[in-house]
Amino acid sequence: MSQKVSIENLTTERQNPQTLHLDELSIREACRLMNEEDAQVAKAVGEELPSIEKVIEKVIEAFRKGGRLIYIGAGTSGRLGVLDAAECVPTFGVEPTMVVGLIAGGQKAMLTAVEGAEDSLDLAEEELRQIQLTKNDVVIGIAASGRTPYVIGGLRYAQDVGAVTCSLSCNKEALISKEAQLAIEVDCGPEFLTGSTRLKAGTAQKLILNMISTISMIGIGKVYGNLMVDVQPTNQKLVERAKRIIMSATEASYEIAEEFYERADHNVKVAIVMILTGSSRKKALEKLQTADGFIRKTN
């Protein structure tokens, strides 16, 4: 790509005519105005639901055949991808390798900007090679500007491998959209603070990543009703949440839920099936395996 990057036509880089006098506003006025700007984000995301749906369908297909969801991005976009990937582990009880977040500059870049990393067309390819990207995986390139070289290079390599490629940008007609099979382009308008894409653009990206990971997990049986039945009880708060989930799913008392939680070896989903079907732990595991992990399909 050219050393000179033209950004003046990007929505995310334009000055917002509603916020030209931020330095003259009271705190209350600035809060009100920022809140009004933020209110536009959900509506903008809503306009992209058909595109988001297509991406989720591909992620569910990938999960069902043993593939992975891999996010690639730089700066705020990369951090949001890493965050979403990390939170899938305790929430849905999946292995850390099932949803992966790659950020330009590596883990150091989560806290400190790594100079030049996002401008490399080769770095993402190297990292995707390291995690042995396959055609069964889905790669989602995230870039508010829609033109980050790190993301473009990664999507090109993923395309060569045969993986499903998707893009998430906050500008229309984004460059990364041309590198992906499926594109999500959410336009939230100019930022409250000119060019600060950690604001509306970042919020939009977080909302969309929430949708992609959560609804994909629903699609592979990680949810019963609206309960996260594969939650990993790794601390006391989550242990109590696990018992409450068992209670809600089965209408059992706290004492019964606690008993079956222990009998199920702290596996919430197994405990629920044991109670609902009157099964032993071994039989409940067999039922879940037959039902592909969906509690509702056990009997």
Image (cartoon, grey):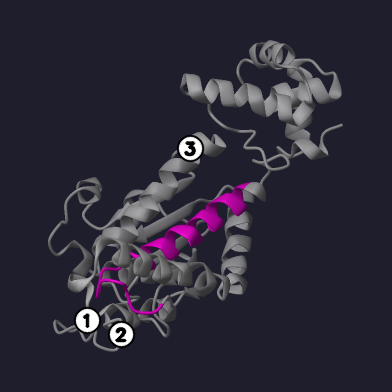
Marks 3 and 1 sit apart, C-alpha to C-alpha, by: 37 Å
- In the image, is 114 to the left or to the right of 92? left
Q: Which mark is residue 1?
A: 1
Position of 292 relative to 194 (above/below): above
- Determine the image quadrant of residue 194: bottom left
Q: Position of residue 41 (x, y in %)?
A: 46, 69
Q: Tell me if residue 215 is in the magenta stretch.
A: yes
Identify the residue at image location x=27%, y=67%.
Answer: 150
Q: Position of residue 55 (x, y in %)?
A: 57, 65
Q: Position of residue 52 (x, y in %)?
A: 57, 67
- Per the rendered image, the range of residues in magenta is 189-217
Q: Nearer the viewer, residue 267 or 204?
A: 204
Using the rendered image of the protein, determine whether residue 220 is visible from the camera's viewpoint: yes
SS type, badge 2: helix
Residue at 26% across, 72% down: 149
Examine the rendered structure and indicate whether residue 208 appears above or below residue 182: above
Q: Residue 298: which quarter of the image?
A: top right
Q: In this figure, which residue is indicated by the disc labeled 3?
A: 89
Is residue 115 rendered magenta in the image? no
| Mark closest to the chain's N terminus, 3 or 1 | 1
